[in-house]
Amino acid sequence: MGPLPAVLGEPIRFTLNWGRRYSLWVFNFGLACCAVEFIASSVGRHDLTQLGVAPFAPGPQQADLMVVSGTVTDKLAPAIKRAYDQMPDPKYVISFGACANSGGPYWDSYSVTKGVDQLIPVDVYVPGCPPRPEALLHGLLRLQEKLAGAPDDSSGAADPGARADSSRADSSLAGLTAPVVRPLTP
Amino acid sequence: MIGAMTPEEVGNRLLAVLGLQEGADMTVSGGGPGHARATVDVPADRWVEALRAARDDAELACDFFDWLSAVDEQERGFAVVAHLWSTRHRHGLLVRTWLPREAPAVASVVEIYPGAAWHERETHEMFGIDFPGHPNLAPLLLPPEFEGHPLRKDFVLASRVAKEWPGTKEPGGDAGAGRRPPMRPPGVPAPGEWGPPDLNQ
């Protein structure tokens, strides 16, 4: 699904974005304690599959979303890069937890990569050590908002406008059972 | 329970089997009631003999090899410690030997406890201690291009030299600065103490 001519316009872009954000196939690159929190957020009580993030992709080649949860070490860094490269476009990355965001509590260590964004472009950072499952659900909602505003031929990471921080005056996310999704105002 | 020995008796038994003076070079460490273990210091040239005695002696019968690693005690050298456990008598024993800082080496115990192979590989790459007699002393955990021995106390943790720590500097944010000297984790050098002089200027 390469770049489409702009003349096809808004209805196509809206439909593609709607389809992409509500059918994310997630590939959990679980490395450490945050992987357990990811699993906890996927089972009954918090249930991230209610957001449409299902099924769990059998490998990077069938995924559009990679969630890097846990500490990234220098020895594993080539493997993460390889898994990201194997994902087909459009692809998105959520960095889950303090270690994946910036190295976290192991920032001083001799073996830790200071954040997975040194290797791959990240769309959403979920802070916490570990983040609560609700934080991951919130991060997925943020990603879905970002996808709602994405141009039709790029993943979220390639579009600098979509990556800008959006400070929304009204937070109309009325609960997690009926997420209100609006495009980010650049 | 078969042969219930107190930690002191376990330690003294190993010293007796080796012919070392009873009571000397042995301490009993904490761990709470019922979990204390004796730590026996043996000379480095009797390391293999000591572990074999711990395994083969009927009263010690330490058939389970638990852990082997080293501690960098700076001026005193490296302490190589082996944690042993007896599944028959349900008692544990720590056997320790001291090595000098320059050219540290102690014989490998792989023929006594084959499970020590990976522990000795990790100790070798983390501390630089040589284990002659080990069949394959290759690095175990570190990436192949890593230089240095990270768990030595003089190994500099250089992340903060290259880049400012991104977190808040003091409890209470910047408002709390100046009240007391900032804490640095061990191994992290003070600003300006290590590295090229013009970094971050």
Image (cartoon, coloured by chain):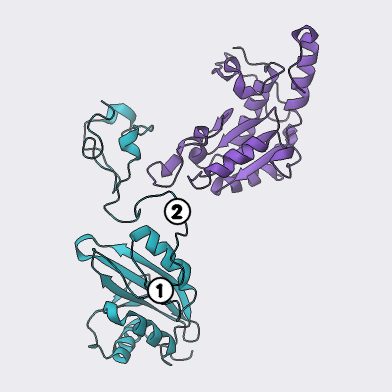
Chain colours: A purple, B cyan
Q: Residue B83 got which mark?
A: 1
- Residue B77: image x %, image y %? 23, 65
Instruction: Point out the tag, 1 or 2, that comes first from the N-terminus.
Output: 1
Of residues B121 and B31, the one drawn nearer to the viewer in this rendering: B121
In the rendered image, the residue lying farthest to the left is B75
The reply to the same-chain question for discs 1 and 2 is yes
State which chain disc 1 sits on.
Answer: B
- State the residue position of label 2: B142
Tell whether B153 sits left or right of A77: left
Tell me which amino acid carries mark 1.
His
Residue B42 appears in view: no
- Whether the residues at callouts 1 and 2 have beta carbons within 8 Å, the answer is no
Tell whether B143 sits left or right of B186: right
Q: Residue B181 got which mark?
A: none
- Residue A96: image x %, image y %? 56, 37
Tell whether B35 sits left or right of A133: left
Could you say which quadrant of the image residue A91 lies in?
A: top right
Tell me which amino acid carries mark 2.
Leu
